[in-house]
Amino acid sequence: MYNHLLYKGYKVQVGILGNKEVNFIAEKEGEKLYIQVALSVNNPDTLEREFGNLKNIPDNYPKKVVTLEAFSGNTVEGIEVRDLRSFLLS
């Protein structure tokens, strides 16, 4: 994921929001993209951890959760859920 974002021209860093972490903050040409990565989001604890971190970010830049599960395009409270394959191909 990190290398893919670099390849696409993004400056990539890890974000800290209070005591929580955002896996990747990708910046390019004044725009930001927040990304959380999870093996699966079927567990309620995982859902809260991955989406909760992104929901607490006060700006309106795109926020995504990327997972290995085979679905894509769902949106939860404005946060897009993408499977890894479609994310890498987009």
Image: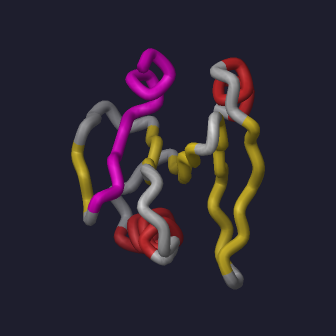
Residue situated in front as seen by the camera: 25 or 45: 25
Q: Position of residue 43 (x, y in %)?
A: 37, 64
Q: Which of 26 and 49 is in front in this view?
A: 26
Residue appearing at x 65%, y 36% in the figure: 28
- Looking at the image, residue 80 sits to the left or right of residue 25; the answer is left
Image: 54 above or below 39 = below
Which residue is at the far left? 74
From the top left corner, tell me how far across and down residue 90 is, in percent: 42, 20
Residue at coordinates 52% horizontally, 50% vertically from top-left?
Answer: 38
Magenta run includes residue 48: no
Q: Which of 13 and 65 is in front in this view?
A: 13
Boundaries of the magenta span: 78-90
**Along the line of sight, which residue is nearer the eye, 43 or 67?**
67
- Where is residue 19? Give x, y as percent: 70, 82
Q: In which quarter of the image is the N terminus?
A: top right
Identify whether 31 is placed above or below 52: above
Toward which corner of the image does residue 55 lie, by quadrant? Answer: bottom left
